[in-house]
Image (spheres, rainbow, N blue to C red):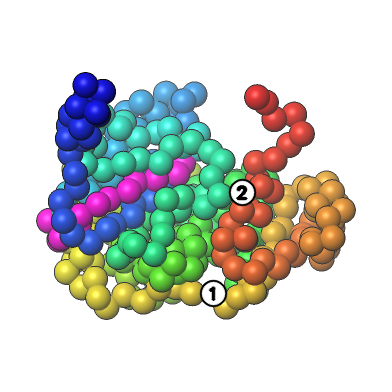
Amino acid sequence: MIAGLLALALAATPAPPAGKKVYISADMEGIAGVVTSEQLGPAGFEYARFREFMTDEVRAAIEAAREGGAGEIVVSDSHGNGQNLLIEKLPADVTIVRSWPRPLMMMEGIDASFAGAIFIGYHSSTTNPQGVRAHTISSATLADVRLNGVSMPEAGINAAIAGHFGVPVIMISGDDAIAAEAGRLLGGIETAVVKWAISFHSARTRTPEAARQVIHERVLAAMRRLGEFKPYRVTAPVELEVRFKNYRPAELLAYLDSVKRTDAHSIRFVGKDMLEVSRFLEFVTNYNSSLEP
Ligand SMILES: [Zn+2]
């Protein structure tokens, strides 16, 4: 009886179609129309609507990936509280990674079985003078994140995590600043520009409908040349340098033998690979001793 119910429950879960596994990491600053905190978190007057637009852009990517031959798809909700996507609006045969912390941050759930990674709603790095809401991991606390001496946008850090597993990034959407930055760093990936940055808090944007169309086009184009993309691999051991906006994180982290303070605001950590670097970054940006429960 119990075995029968279990079999029924398993049968009721739609199996993904056969095909290449695709990973989708979704952020929010690079969604069409997003320009300020009013769209980016529960306190903003437009957040409820923009969660829908974010979900719609992810769904456009899922549908195009499927059209291009994707099978299993894992989506990570990788903005803010990690609970932005309206999961009931996504197809029944995808799974969604939610909330924090996660050892692989915005790439949790990826492994060597995936054929490609797609970044939706991405934004430029904190060291880029251009781009809507340009920041790296935390706009409040970090002023630079470097891997082996190169300042990285989140797209670069996440591409290096995917690259650890031999998985290439095939497509990115966001404003024109991250499209250019990711293009320079990753080379030859498909890009969907959904808005053009005017300043940190202003852009000329496509409509949500037009954004979905360009995302659909670029994801489909990427799927059609899936075999051409190369994984982005950083040389191991990986030297991570983090510059904090404040003084005390660098001071305290330097108590650890594995961390070297390189100036008043900066530390260096060497990880044996990107997985160790990812866990260290997630620790540094999430830990405080008053965590509960
Ligand atoms: Zn982000």
Q: Which mark is residue 234?
A: 1
SS of the residue under disc 1? loop
Q: Residue at x 70, y 40 (%)?
A: 287
Q: In x, y percent, where is residue 284?
A: 69, 48
Q: Say if residue 126 shows up in the picture.
A: no
Residues at discs 2 and 1 in contact (Cβ within 8 Å): no
Mark 2 or 1 closer to N-term? 1
Q: Is residue 77 above or below residue 228?
A: above
Please report the residue visible at 67 percent of the width from the left and 66 percent of the height from the top: 271
CB at disc 1 and ligand 1 closer than 8 Å: no
Q: Which picture quadrant has residue 184?
A: bottom left
Q: Position of residue 226 (x, y in %)?
A: 24, 71
**Magenta segment range?**
67-79
Question: Can you give x and y, in whole percent of width and height, for residue 172 in the image?
Answer: 34, 60
Regarding mark 2 in the picture, which secondary structure is present there? helix
Residue holding disc 2: 282
Instruction: Please indicate, yes or no, whether residue 137 appears anywhere in the rendered image.
Output: yes
Q: Residues within 10 Å of mark 1 (few under 14, many from 20)?
A: some
Q: Quadrant of the N terminus?
A: top left
Which residue sits at x=12%, y=56%? Answer: 67
**Image location (x, y in percent) of residue 203:** 39, 48
| Residue type at numbered disc 1 | Val
Q: Separation of disc 2 and disc 1 at Cα?
A: 19 Å
Is 78 situated above or below 242? above
Residue shown at the point (27%, 78%) measured from the top left: 228
Q: Is residue 122 above or below residue 238?
A: above
Type of secondary structure dominating the magenta stretch:
strand
